[in-house]
Image: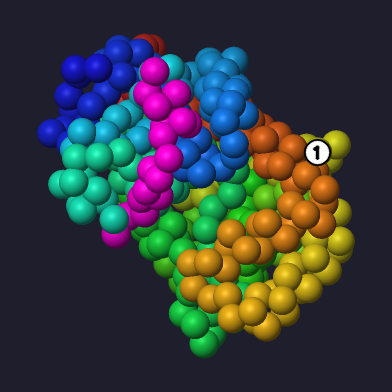
Amino acid sequence: MNETVHELIELGEEVATALSEHRPVVALESTVIAHGMAYPGNVETARAIEQAVRSAGAVPATIGIADGRFVVGMDDKRIEQFATTRGVPKVSSRDIGPVLAGGGLGATTVASSLVAADLAGIPVFSTAGIGGVHRGAQTTFDISADLVQFTRSRVAVVCAGAKSILDLGLTLEYLETLGVPVMGYRCDDFPAFYCRSSGFRNPQRIDDLDAIARALRAHWAAGLPGGALVTHPIAEADALDAQAMEEVIERALADADAEGVTGPAITPYLMKAVSRATEGRSAAANRAVLISTAAVAGELAVAYTRQAGVGGGGDR
């Protein structure tokens, strides 16, 4: 792990080779390893996500922070370290400076992973679900840093929409305000993570990944800032019922209000409530959607790279 494209980036050997040969690469976050699930399930899931990218013809680049740098392309030893070390901080974009300066470990979220992917020159990133506008944000102003980071990093984000615990209508409105393209791959509706539909439409539906890759290239060629969102829903067999989820979330929100749970504590509180109510089925759905979005991201990375010409990655 010695290849360098930026002083704050340490590339894994496989990723460095792929980038130098202009082959497709998909960036992945590490929060799912350090905070997503218990050991050894977190390691098994991380490897399954990477395998989904490989099966699509791309190279996975799992991102974390260690020793004052972004590690882009964590090897098995590093993944094991993140999976078993207690207290690894979750790093969003605002936390990057202090954590890098501190020299310790840091698990990257969507927002911080996009910063690293952009620095490394990786144009495609995969995650299960993005952050968004929280319910009640009209008074709390609780809006995920993910949405703002989409306007700053030239990276396409492949996801299954956003978590249903959020206000998905306001999330789409805010994305429109920020000028972030939202393209549904073979889906009319904006997905809701565990659920196939949020009840809101994707601004664009595009059924061909080559067409999406061309749209991304045109967006950046026009000098527009930031990236784009490519949504694809969880498979029907793995999805949870949207109405049942809404009822669970409404009850959990009322309980959280009664208990005085606010701010950063609200999301884990709601996710635990969903897990209890679904008797663990949400965990299986979470794993399924992480893998399915990684597969689509791998296919998109291949399409994007192919358009650059023979063996070429072009400008990205």
Q: Position of residue 297 (x, y in %)?
A: 54, 32
Residue reaching furthest bottom?
139
Q: Is residue 36 above or below residue 309?
A: below
Q: Is residue 237 visible?
A: yes
Q: Is residue 42 above or below residue 140?
A: above
Q: Is 304 left, or right, of 63 in this rendering?
A: right
Residue 113 found in image quarter: top left
The color scheme shown is rainbow
Please name the residue shown 82% across and 57% down the image.
277
Please name the residue shown 74% across and 52% down the image.
275
Give yes or no for residue 83 being in the magenta stretch: yes
Q: Which quarter of the figure is the N terminus placed in?
A: top left
Query: Looking at this view, is 221 or 304 the one in front?
Result: 304
Q: Is residue 241 above or below residue 15?
A: below
Please name the residue shown 52% across and 58% down the image.
131
Secondary element at tag 1? helix
**Within 10 angstroms of label 1, few (less than 14), some, or many (20 or more) residues?**
some
Q: Is 309 left, or right, of 171 in this rendering?
A: left
Q: Which quarter of the figure is the C terminus placed in?
A: top left
Give yes or no for residue 179 being in the magenta stretch: no
Q: Is residue 115 above or below residue 7?
A: below
Q: Position of residue 80 (x, y in %)?
A: 45, 24
Please name the residue shown 70% across and 34% down the image.
288
Query: Looking at this view, is 237 or 189 the one in front?
Result: 237
Q: Is 232 left, or right, of 100 in this rendering?
A: right
Residue reaching furthest left?
7
Residue 68 found in image quarter: top left
**Residue identified by numbered label 1:** 238
Query: Looking at this view, is 316 or 284 the one in front?
Result: 284
State which region is magenta.
Answer: 77-94
